[in-house]
């Protein structure tokens, strides 16, 4: 790639958005080559980055890079970026900023205890200040001019920014309060750049609970279970909510469930209430228990199921199935629950959809635009919670920075 750089002046790069991928990109660009500008429609940087700190600032995950990469869909899209900058690199990068990390009991990686999310963001911002990165707040991107320079509205004034390179880091369609509303998709569609409607991911699901069950168990966790859907089997836990379920084990299935509801008009999850036991072992325990004991007593005292699991089983099992040992075991291991809906875009932790992966090349360049790139959650990829979402954003920002640092400048 050759970019004109007359009179040895720096190349102006305009980054639109100030989320995790944008901040990493700016931090890794060579300030001797680039005049780096970040345009943010809000009045502060990194608002969505700080949202990730609610309930614990999970920066990445500690599992091996070999297994880590397989948490992404599609794997082959994220793989080259992750190879360039993986979860181990992320920990080192933050520690070089003075943000030491530790691995929690869940194997997730957090800043050391006592380090608050705003301190992490401030450490990044200090690095950007040292690199003379210029921030432009309250600049909302609205279109391109005839030369594909970005056009902004700032204080009710339309402003065109001449740029050698433009990088979009506009986020997905969730957490509108942070500025990530996904409205940018309509601008790309004006220029026939391929996009995909946003759908919620990593979100709660809706279930038509029995009102008596809900009265007893709303807000209660269901632990040591696994959930099946679409050939995916996730161990973990979930929480009963007034409208359905939420929690890591259900979040991992939410995007698939959303697609099933859209295209098939129906969706089910299947809960394994005893993921640590095989069907035959459960059946033998039931058969060898004293016949004088009630089924509920057997479930409680012999199989060690708690009240909430027994109640779930009763709600979604017919009387005939409950009293048939073989059918009961099948339900214990694969309890079907109909999903009647999923949370809205704004309630979701992340989204799928956005800029189609067909619209960009292997270096994250938008094919139909001259020197325009896109990174982060605005692209159509998916990952579970637990540090995987942030990691991919960091990896893309790092990858693109080092790609741009290495281009041939004449």
Image (cartoon, helix red, strand yellow):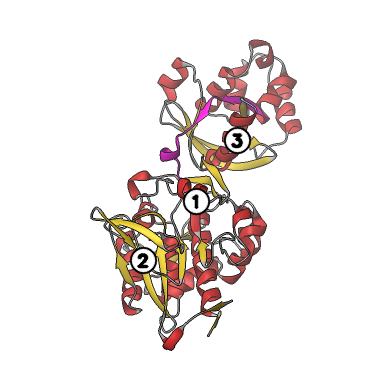
Q: Residue furthest front?
A: 146
Residue that appears at 49% across and 64% down: 394
Q: Position of residue 239 (x, y in %)?
A: 46, 34
Which residue is tagged 2?
161
Q: Is residue 338 highlighted in magenta?
A: yes
Q: Residue 146's quadrant in the figure?
A: bottom left
Instruction: Name the side, left or right, on which 86 lies relative to 187.
Output: right
Q: Is residue 174 above or below residue 133?
A: above
Indicate which disc, 3 or 2, sits on the residue closer to the N terminus: 2
Q: Find the magenta span and give its range.
A: 334-349
Q: Position of residue 312 (x, y in %)?
A: 55, 23
How far apart are the two marked residues, 1 and 2, measured between alpha carbons?
Answer: 18 Å
Q: Secondary structure at mark 3?
A: helix
Regarding residue 288, the answer to whether it shows in the image is yes
Indicate which disc, 1 or 2, sits on the residue closer to the N terminus: 2
Q: Secondary structure at mark 2?
A: loop
Residue 259 marker: 3
Mark 1 neighbour density, 10 Å: few (under 14) some (14–19) many (20 or more): some
Which residue is tagged 1?
188
Q: Position of residue 52 (x, y in %)?
A: 40, 53
Instruction: Name the side, left or right, on which 53 lies relative to 221.
Output: left
Q: Is residue 14 highlighted in magenta?
A: no
Mark 3 neighbour density, 10 Å: few (under 14) some (14–19) many (20 or more): some
Labels in figure, total:
3
């Amino acid at each position: 790639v050759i970019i004109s750089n007359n009179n040895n002046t720096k190349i102006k790069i305009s980054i639109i958005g100030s989320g995790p991928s944008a901040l990493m990109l700016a931090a890794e660009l060579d300030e001797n080559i680039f005049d780096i500008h970040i345009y943010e429609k809000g009045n502060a940087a990194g608002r969505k980055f700080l949202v990730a700190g609610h309930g614990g600032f999970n920066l990445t995950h500690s599992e091996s890079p070999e297994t880590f990469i397989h948490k992404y869909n599609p794997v082959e899209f994220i793989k080259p970026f992750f190879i360039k900058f993986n979860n181990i690199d992320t920990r080192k990068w933050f520690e070089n900023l003075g943000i030491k990390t530790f691995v929690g009991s869940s194997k997730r990686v957090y800043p050391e205890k006592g380090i608050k999310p705003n301190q992490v963001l401030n450490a990044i911002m200090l690095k950007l200040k040292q690199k003379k990165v210029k921030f432009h707040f309250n600049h909302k991107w609205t279109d391109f001019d005839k030369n594909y320079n970005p056009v902004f509205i700032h204080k009710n004034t339309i402003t065109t920014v001449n740029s050698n390179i433009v990088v979009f880091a506009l986020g997905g369609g969730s957490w509108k309060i942070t500025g990530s509303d996904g409205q940018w998709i309509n601008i790309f569609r004006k220029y026939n750049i391929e996009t995909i409607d946003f759908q919620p991911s990593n979100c709660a699901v809706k279930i038509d609970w029995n009102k008596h069950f809900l009265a007893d168990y709303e807000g209660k966790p269901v632990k040591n279970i696994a959930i099946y859907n679409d050939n995916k089997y996730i161990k973990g836990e979930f929480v009963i909510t007034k409208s359905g379920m939420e929690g890591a084990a259900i979040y991992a299935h939410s995007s698939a469930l959303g697609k099933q509801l859209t295209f098939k008009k129906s969706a089910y999850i299947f809960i394994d209430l005893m993921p640590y036991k095989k069907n035959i072992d459960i059946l033998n325990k039931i058969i060898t228990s004293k016949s004088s004991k009630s089924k509920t007593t057997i479930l409680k005292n012999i199989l060690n199921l708690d009240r909430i699991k027994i109640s779930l089983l009763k709600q979604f099992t017919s009387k005939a199935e409950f009293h048939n040992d073989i059918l009961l075991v099948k339900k214990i291991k694969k309890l079907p629950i109909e999903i009647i809906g999923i949370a809205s875009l704004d309630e979701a932790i992340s989204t799928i959809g956005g800029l189609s992966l067909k619209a960009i090349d292997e270096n994250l360049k938008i094919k139909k635009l001259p020197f325009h790139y896109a990174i982060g959650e605005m692209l159509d990829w998916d990952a579970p919670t637990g540090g995987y979402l942030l990691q991919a954003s960091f990896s893309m920002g790092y990858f693109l920075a080092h790609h741009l640092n290495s281009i041939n400048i004449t």
